[in-house]
Image (tube, grey):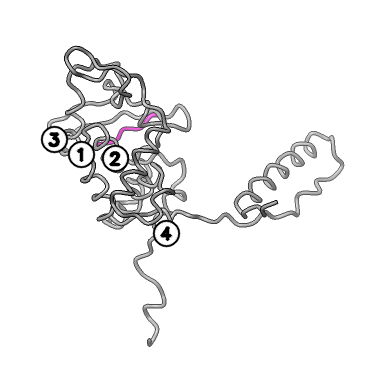
Amino acid sequence: MKPLEDNSKRRIINSVKSLYSFAYTSGLFPTNVMAAVKPPSAKSAISQRILSEATVLKMIVLEQDPRNHAILHTLYAAGLRVSELCNLRWRHVIRWVDGVQLDIMSGKGDKQRHVLLTESSWNVLSVLREGSSDDDFVFQSRQEVSREGYYKGTRLDTTTIFRIVREAARKAGVKNWAEVSPHWLRHCHGSHAIDRKAPLTVVRDTLGHSNIAVTNEYAKARPDQSSSQYLPL
């Protein structure tokens, strides 16, 4: 049997600790034998999933299909979770004079957030707008084409989004392209925005993090300075 990763061990131990804690506080156990057990520290793999700005832009630019191009652009520009992208309808897309606003229902609950995008993002999305009602999904499958030539498909499934992202990574020359997922573009959004001096609170609110400590992982993944720079080497 393959040994468990530390993060997997941590989840299991925390689950058992929670069970024993409940049993102890409920009077079912005389003592909490798991109280002294410490799970392994969580390890972040974010740094291994952050592509360079040039690579991400190459993935987007090389995609010539308007729908797939818009998918890649929006995943990166808005930092969306794949479920949030799939559930996006035109009524969630609000046009402003100098850009566009996306009203996102969190993929992890009932919280809503508002993401502002630039005029260039609207130009990419608007190509898909013609012939769609406000209740239509922005990114549709291609199961049916109307007489006017517009796509009248259903909601895209996450498997298709994964395939589109991985194919874009392959075309862009990413060595481990088969491992790339839509969430990588969300990681890239957070890291690249922080690199460009975006405040952590702004990145937190854009990505919909419940805790700024989660957002801070992007800063840790790509540090801009180190004490090693002060050594006489």
Vertical relation: 215 (above or below) 115: below
Marks 2 and 4, Cα distance to the nearest angstrom?
Answer: 23 Å
The quadrant of the rendering that contains the C terminus is bottom left
Disc on the earlier residue, 3 or 4: 3
Instruction: Give, as a single range, the part of the protein colored magenta.
Output: 112-117
Question: Residue 222 appears at what percent x and percent y?
Answer: 38, 61
Q: The residue under label 3 is which amino acid type?
A: Asp
Q: What element carries label 4?
A: helix
| Mark 1, residue position | 64
Q: How far separated are the C-alphas under marks 2 and 1?
A: 11 Å
Q: Where is residue 54 in the image (x, y as percent from the top left)?
A: 25, 55
**Which secondary structure lies at badge 2?**
helix
Judging by the rendered image, the residue that carries numbered circle 4 is 221
Q: At 30% from the left edge and 27% from the top edge, which residue is drawn? A: 139
Q: Which amino acid does label 4 sit on?
A: Ala
Q: What residue did someone put label 3 on?
A: 98
The location of residue 19, given as percent across then percent down, is 74, 39
State the mark number for residue 72.
2
Residue 167 falls in which quadrant of the image? top left
